Image (cartoon, coloured by chain):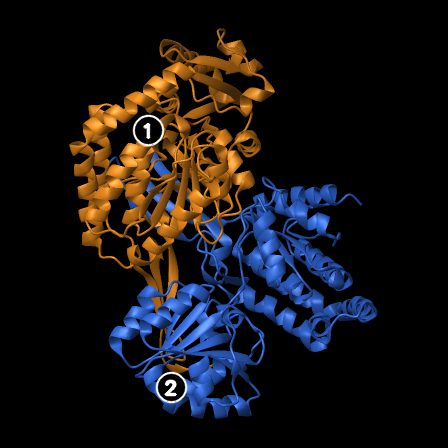
Chain colours: A blue, B orange
Amino acid sequence: MDAKQHVIDKAILAKEAVRKLAIIDTNTKNKALYAMADALIENMDVILEANSKDMQNGKEKGLTKALLDRLLLDEKRINSMAEGLREIAFLDDPIGEVVKMWKRPNNLKIGQVRVPLGVIGIIYEARPNVTVDAAGLCIKAGNAVILRGGSEAINSNTAVAKIISDAAEKAGLPKGSINLIEITDREAANVMMKANGYIDVLIPRGGAGLINAVVKNATVPVIETGVGNCHIYVDESADMDNAIDIIINAKTQRPAVCNAMETLLVHKNIAEEFLPKLGEKLDSMGVEIRGCSATQNIIKSAKQATEEDWSTEYLDLILAIKVVDTIDEALEHIYKYGTKHSEAILTNNYENSQRFLNEVDAAAVYINASTRFTDGSEFGFGAEIGISTQKLHARGPMGLKELTTTKYIIYGEGQTR
Amino acid sequence: MDAKQHVIDKAILAKEAVRKLAIIDTNTKNKALYAMADALIENMDVILEANSKDMQNGKEKGLTKALLDRLLLDEKRINSMAEGLREIAFLDDPIGEVVKMWKRPNNLKIGQVRVPLGVIGIIYEARPNVTVDAAGLCIKAGNAVILRGGSEAINSNTAVAKIISDAAEKAGLPKGSINLIEITDREAANVMMKANGYIDVLIPRGGAGLINAVVKNATVPVIETGVGNCHIYVDESADMDNAIDIIINAKTQRPAVCNAMETLLVHKNIAEEFLPKLGEKLDSMGVEIRGCSATQNIIKSAKQATEEDWSTEYLDLILAIKVVDTIDEALEHIYKYGTKHSEAILTNNYENSQRFLNEVDAAAVYINASTRFTDGSEFGFGAEIGISTQKLHARGPMGLKELTTTKYIIYGEGQTR
């Protein structure tokens, strides 16, 4: 099968589907989402069988335990995929919203209306649930989707995509609304990245390697997601008990995700009292500490942090700690090493809280809360397609609205310039 | 001078400037814009002298009359550049606007706040006025700008950039807010296109060749501007006199710009009566007609339109005309040949007007008005940096707001997940 032809064939189907999807009513889209959810449950055996093939192949290929766990589907996970689709049906349809409308002096009425982006390409790795989540969100926002998952999950993805695509079509969505690229070598992904005129937007979901490859190679517009080297700065005036709760939450509640904290900055005037208490708690939670010299003087068990530690996204139970002389030093450190994802200050000082909010350039900037809240559900968006770490189009958690664009509609009565 | 080092040096200055620019008060930005305007007037002789060098070089290189006209600066044009800066000072500052703010069930207060994009790169061609317009708009929205103009205008651009940059700095803007790349070979532009981590957004302004080169080669996010193969569809029920006014306006008022009409579609039931009247008027305005066979049968002077005509952006006094059987055929033609810029229907039929608005996928869709209104000033944005023809981030005329992004600010009181 020729990768280029395969991708272009799917993209042509998707482009045709988009013309109808863009103007379809919300009820039909919701009906399709429910039908997709039902079909997943009804065909659970088919999915489990396909997944067991992937698991078998994965074991033979020697995939890590973590990767195998991501790949695994079981009854509970399939139920949860179906539930996710029903939740998307429940969300407000963003399409058709008149963002604003105004009248010009010449009586032209100009309105800005929310419309679908068009054909969205998703390039992702081992998790088969992305196939369902991404498809559900894209079609609710009136987009067609072209999914290209990892080779490890090809049997699961093929089964799942066929089931939801058939169910969607039967429920009234145009053919070609949901498409899976069945070629998982690099070539197919490369074709997607250069498919200007066919694919409107590419969203990579996965590790830093995948995301960087897409950003570097794509000529199609990309929404960059992911990398989070997040900091918490404990100001001199912070409430210490509260700070410990927040830090433990941001580091340990789910260390492998992008909004987990990686480096802690502590004001020198509070370090002597605060760090021993914190160190004890971190120890008890199994967190390895890598500290600057001042930190090591206070927490004896801390290893020496190297320059590399300040820029590492551990995604693990490891925390880098640095004692800083001033809030300026903290801001400078975040500017130098941060990835503009999520940053927090813990303080009771009004001026410092406002300086931190204003001066830190990141998708989400917190006062006195855990960085773990940077998430579509936590923000109240209902579901998310990812967390944008770029500045163009979308920044931070991306919900349905971020899968849309706008167009201007102009009501005239014969006006000329 | 090493092109790469030159660009990176400027970008480092710009990045530093952005940190201060992002939090500077509106009064200082406005004061700087006025100071820049005054400096242009005070140094008019310096600019005119530099421009005369460019004009001399241009004549020796055999630039076309049109290009030489774009390159030319005179007292009137310099005054108008200065006036443009004063108008930007008059516009509302978009930075700091709280787009929305809401409270979550856990009492987190989440706000979405408008902030600058950061460092904006502008790659443009022969018009030295872009140097001033782009710099003014970028800094008003709190961005630093890196300007890379065409080689033809290098003397003018160097003089103008130095004058406004010095004036801005003296008025309180950080050094490095306005930067001109002094190397005009392709290498410097290529470095800008790949300067991820230094340049946040690239906006190419110029012809299709330049824009395509940037879209194809850039790894930095790009906002695509420009190409407009715009259509007007005259429906069966259109008011004919009104239609003639609009068509003449859209084709002849300024044929060389992207929102001028290039192809006219006419419903067959009105063609026999309408086209002779229109043909006469177009003739009198010196517009060459290239028509389908049905058009040629009615307007005898019309040349035969070829397949190529339907996709050509003439930017000239040439109009392609096609007679269509139905509104569906018109919609299909626009889908196939349009560039998603500006499209208009002239009609008195309610259903057709709504179908056209809903089904045409373009930055601006008009009922009963000229496509020439797709413009920042005409939309009431005050000034524009270009017209986006892409779907990501900005679509249609881009004013100050489109030169910004947002960040989420979160007010907590100790919340954890």
Identify which amino acid the numbered label 2 is placed on. Ala
Where's residue B261, x and y in %?
43, 25
Residue A28, visible in the rendered structure: no
Which residue has dot 1 on it?
B155
Q: Residue A108 carries which label?
A: none
Mark 2 lies on a secondary structure that is: helix
Parent chain of label 1? B
Q: Which amino acid does label 1 sit on?
A: Asn
Location of mark 2 (residue): A271
Q: Is residue A43 shown left or right of residue A412?
A: right
Rendering coords of residue B8 (x, y %): 44, 47
Residue A137 location (% of width, % of height) = 56, 60
User: For this rendering, which residue is in front, A328 or B103?
Assistant: A328
- Which of the 4 quarters of the picture holds residue A15? top right
Position of residue B263 in the picture relative to residue A7 (left or right): left
Query: Which sits in the foreground, B415 or A110?
Result: B415
Location of the C terminus of chain A by quadrant is: top left
Toward which corner of the image does residue B95 lie, by quadrant? bottom left
| A403 left or right of A40 in image | left
Residue at 47% from the left image edge and 40% from the top image edge = B2
What secondary structure is found at the residue carrying circle 1?
Answer: helix
Marks 1 and 2, how far apart in space?
A: 57 Å
Image position of B290 (left or right of A273)? right
The quadrant the N terminus of chain A occupies is top right
* Residue A184 vs residue B217, the one in the foreground: B217
- The residue sitting at 55% across, 52% down in the picture is A142
Residue farthest to the top?
Answer: B300
Q: Tell me: residue A74, above or below residue B196.
A: below
Residue depicted at 48% across the width and 7% down the height? B301
Q: Are marks 1 and 2 on the same chain?
A: no
